Image: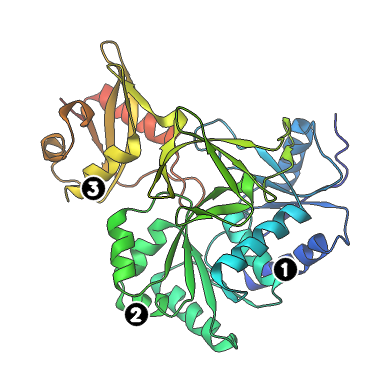
Amino acid sequence: MAETARLHVVRVERTQADVDWLTERLRKFLHGSTRSVLVPAGGEENLVATLENIERRTVFLPDEVGLVLRTSGSTSAHGRLVGISASQLLASINATDARLGGAGTWVLALPPHHIAGLQVVARAAVGDRSVVVVEGKVTPGALAEAIDAAVQKDPKDRVYLSLVPTQLTDCMGDPVARVALARCAAILVGGAAASPELVAEARAAGIPIVLTYGMSETCGGCVYDGVPLDGVQVSLDEDGRVSLSGPMVMSGYLDEGPTGQWYRTGDIAHWQDGRLVVDGRADDLIISGGLKISPGHVAHAVTSTGLAAECVVVGLPDERWGQVVTAVVTGCAEPHRVREAVDLPRQLRPQVVVTAEAIPMLAPGKVDRREVIRLAEQARAEGSAWTR
């Protein structure tokens, strides 16, 4: 077993006081002036129970690791324990600054105990810049006020922001927020796939959207707008499975062991016009009648009909087909019309449509696919789902 006395679980919430503390703590970590290992925790977590769980699971904790992040575990029973070193986090920050054009003032609208929010604080710490925190509920109005405050603080007028697609969607419906977003130098959007329509609408409004792909294991986004950051290498196997290499790739999983030079992700993708296009999770692929079906492709086709506000597509067990394509939708008054309205070959269209008040979520922007499948199976069993 690894020696775990260095592990310190600390609650870090989206408040100015907590962010100020985290900024100083990350500076110490990045400057090599502390040996303790920070494990950021959310506001609802029991710190003692969390530490006990991590200590029990830890089998690998090299000296270089000073930060542990936990993945959301959207398709598994629990998240993994990601070990990050100062050099890895710095490599990510420097590559991001190089791509965006320099340091700036960051607005924090995401939880700082997850990688996207923590990176906002870390980037500001390295650049000796401020973090403007959106405290309380993140509404379009609150975001607009925070951006205005950041613009007033920044001497070079370079304000950055990270959002998940749902936050961007909310802002696009608010005229004041739309104007405020357009004042940013760049807005990183990640955590989940953003619809092409949303991205096109935002960019047409002069909002500088940068679509990011990455994960905790790569210190956050490492591919921006389909182009790998400096130092990042991307490899696709014959099935399209993505592997990543570079100086920002983690040391390894505390609950498993070291990574090696290449980190094999759970995603599938393809190259299009020299840019990486992520198709979705390999584990989420639906095998129906021998066909491999991309859930994200079907979900986009469903929302494009205008019959649903949101859609998550999963495969439910079926004796004849192996799995059936199942669409879980919100804002849909006519689920019986979805299958015929979808502009896809018939074998790719949903055979089951389930309406829900909201899509179950884990971390911001992360769909809880286990809960989505449970809701869909329950609706089918109860007869409340539309079936072909």
Circle nearer the N terminus (2, 1): 1
Compared to residue 226, the image places residue 288 above or below, namely above
Please provide percent x and percent y for residue 275: 43, 50
- Observer able to see residue 135: no
The answer to whether the residue labelled 2 contacts the one labelled 1, judged by CB atoms less than 8 Å apart, is: no
Viewer-proximal residue among 262 and 19: 262
Residue assigned mark 2 = 176
Marks 3/2: CA–CA distance: 26 Å
Residue assigned mark 1 = 23
Q: Residue 335 is drawn in which quadrant?
A: top left
**Residue 303 disc label:** 3
Badge 2 element: helix
Please provide percent x and percent y for residue 74: 50, 38
Compared to residue 345, the image places residue 142 above or below, namely below
Q: Quadrant for the C terminus, please.
A: top left
Q: Residue 280 is drawn in which quadrant?
A: top left
Marks 3/1: CA–CA distance: 40 Å
